[in-house]
Amino acid sequence: MDRLDRISIWAIVALIISSFALMGRHTGEARPDRSSQQRKVSSDYAAANVEMGDRIKQIRNILEGDSPVKAEAMAMELIQKYPYEGEPRMLMGDILMRKQEAVKAMLEYREAIDLNPDYLDKKTPLFQGKKLKVAVGEALVEIERKMKLNPGDESLRADRKIIYYLQRKIAGSCS
């Protein structure tokens, strides 16, 4: 064993000792106490989730009672109140599908998926992949029909790109 081997061994021993010392000193620091402001924010969020869930159930009941216009107005209020939640967007997509507006519904579904990708994860209770696949298929048929009538329309091309984007996302999740 030459001098370089001894230095390497002593360096490794020093690193092991220092790592154990650091781990021993920082044990229990992984769960720091939250400040009162953080606790308040999380409790407000839980209350908002309950309120939003109740409103969504109410809107779904109205939609099932064949009043899509009233349900759409209530869903728009919910979207305005909770702009970073995916559930109101998903609900708006359902309303638009009920009104036979597949392209607009597809745009709402895209917003919902961008806000909460769990809608395409089979392992979560939020999975909506099969419904989204049908909606995207209907929207594609509608856009292709409109493109035959007006082939130069740029908004239809943009919508078709969004549909292809959603098809890729759905294919990556539903396989």
Image (cartoon, rainbow, N blue to C red):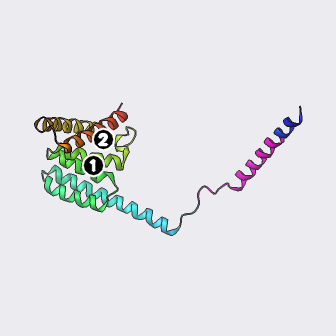
Q: Quadrant of the N terminus?
A: top right
Question: Would residue 173 be found to the left or right of residue 56 on screen?
Answer: right
Whole-percent x and y of residue 106? 24, 44
Establish if 5 lies above or below 117.
above
Q: Tell me where residue 16 sits by quadrant.
A: top right
Establish if 47 lies above or below 148.
below
Question: Would residue 124 be found to the left or right of residue 109 on screen?
Answer: right
Residue 128 is marked as 2
| Chief secondary structure of the magenta portion | helix
Q: Tell me where residue 48 sits by quadrant.
A: bottom left
Looking at marks 2 and 1 on the same chain, the residue that comes earlier in the sequence is marked by 1
Q: Residues within 10 Å of mark 1 (few under 14, many from 20)?
A: many
Question: Would residue 88 be found to the left or right of residue 73 on screen?
Answer: right
Question: Residue flagged by tag 1: what amino acid is it?
Answer: Met
Q: Residue at x 59, y 57 (%)?
A: 31
**Range of the magenta residues?**
10-31
Q: Residue furthest right?
A: 2
Which residue bears the numbered disc 1?
90
Question: Residue flagged by tag 2: what amino acid is it?
Answer: Gln
Q: Quadrant of the C terminus?
A: top left
Q: Residues within 10 Å of mark 2 (few under 14, many from 20)?
A: some
Element class at badge 1: helix
Q: Residue furthest left?
A: 149
Q: Residue furthest bottom?
A: 36
Element class at badge 2: loop
Is label 2 in contact with label 1 (beta carbons under 8 Å)? Answer: yes
- From the viewer's side, name the closer residue of 83 and 59: 83
Whole-percent x and y of residue 76? 22, 58
- From the viewer's side, name the closer residue of 121 and 149: 149
Whole-percent x and y of residue 74? 21, 59
Q: Residue at x 13, y 55 (%)?
A: 69
